[in-house]
Image (spheres, rainbow, N blue to C red):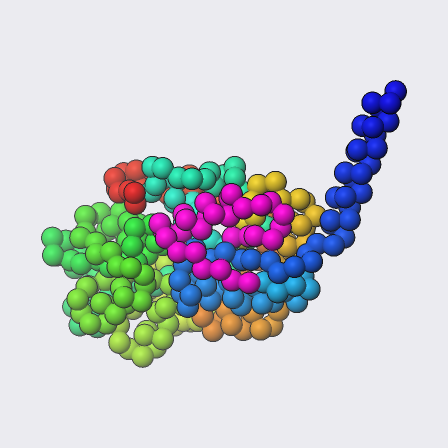
Amino acid sequence: MTSIRHLLAGAAALAFGLGAWAQGYPNKPITLVVPFAAGGPTDVVARSVGAAMAKTLGQSVVIENKLGAGGTLAAGYVAKAAPDGYTVLIHHNGMATAPSLYRKLSFNAQTDFEYVGQVVDVPMTLLGRKDLPANNAQELAAWLKANAAKVNLAHAGLGAVSHLCSMVLRQAVGVELQTVPYQGTAPAMTALLGGQVDVLCDQTTQTVQHIKAGTVKMYGTTTAQRIKALPDAPTLAEAGLKGVEVVVWHGVYAPKGTPKEALDKLNAALRAALKDPGVTARMAELGAEVVPESKQTPEALRTWLKAETERYAPMIKAAGVYAD
């Protein structure tokens, strides 16, 4: 009888403790871990959204840039963090491609995280050096086939979305192309502007200014529909190069076991942030688009991550490339 009373008392104390924790969360700053460099596309999104989330949470959201291993270092760090709602991760497509690109990972993207929601989609653009002979997407496909042995296709490093886009492009054109990895999108763009490489697929957050300045050739967007930031630019499918559809998507994750109360508050703050006029204006300026409300849920992110992982696994396996 005494043991039963002790068990009941313990359960009541635990329930009270959890309730008190839920009412008090958050009572200190929350760290939003970004897997890439400050000033980069994901970092820009994180800082804008994090600042807006802080308004709802009543606590500051501190950005921590944890670089390395194509974003897997940051993901592994958050997977092993205390599941208390104070350490969360923002990551892009790399969460879906990492299981295929890395043969040894310190985390499982499907089982080691709780899901908060999707954030924004960033379209990509296919660019060529300014003096490239091809003037449209169909001419580019023909030029790539005719010059496959000497074409230099730049990307921002193994595991980057620009690397993924390069694989999709090669598959769509039907030829193997020489790829040139750089340590990030900035040096890859510098190489394209300088004529050291021929072609680059990169996010609008990095390319719109160069497209508008006329310092590169723009062949189309990698989206299903035209984008607001470049309304006169055709999609690659419209321009006659089908099969190159890649969008940089972002999601927010928490360590497995994070209490539902914390996840609910984080999701509510994320939803509010994505309606914030300052956030929507900043995203529009960058060519990024806030995802529809139906995608801003934990379950939507879970479903999307699984689908994207299954989509790219065969492609990466066929390419035979690994990042480790």
Q: Nearer the viewer, residue 258 or 304?
A: 258
Is residue 69 in view?
A: yes
At x 84%, y 23%, the residue is 4
Vertical side of 101 occupied by 225: above or below = below
Instruction: Identify the magenta region.
Output: 62-89
Q: Quadrant of residue 201?
A: bottom left
Q: Quadrant of residue 256?
A: top right
Q: Nearer the viewer, residue 40 or 218?
A: 40
At x 36%, y 37%, the residue is 104
The reply to whether the magenta stretch includes residue 68 is yes
Which quadrant of the rendered structure holds the N terminus? top right
Image coordinates of residue 283 in percent, x first then y, are 50, 69
Which quadrant of the rendered structure holds the C terminus? top left
310 vs 253, left or right, is: left
Image coordinates of residue 170 in percent, x first then y, are 24, 50
66 vs 189, left or right, is: right
At x 86%, y 27%, the residue is 5
318 vs 112, left or right, is: left
Image coordinates of residue 171 in percent, x first then y, are 26, 47
Residue pushed farthest right? 1
Vertical side of 102 occupied by 38: above or below = below
Q: Nearer the viewer, residue 257 or 295?
A: 257
Image coordinates of residue 304 in percent, x first then y, are 50, 45
Vertical side of 312 occupied by 126: above or below = below
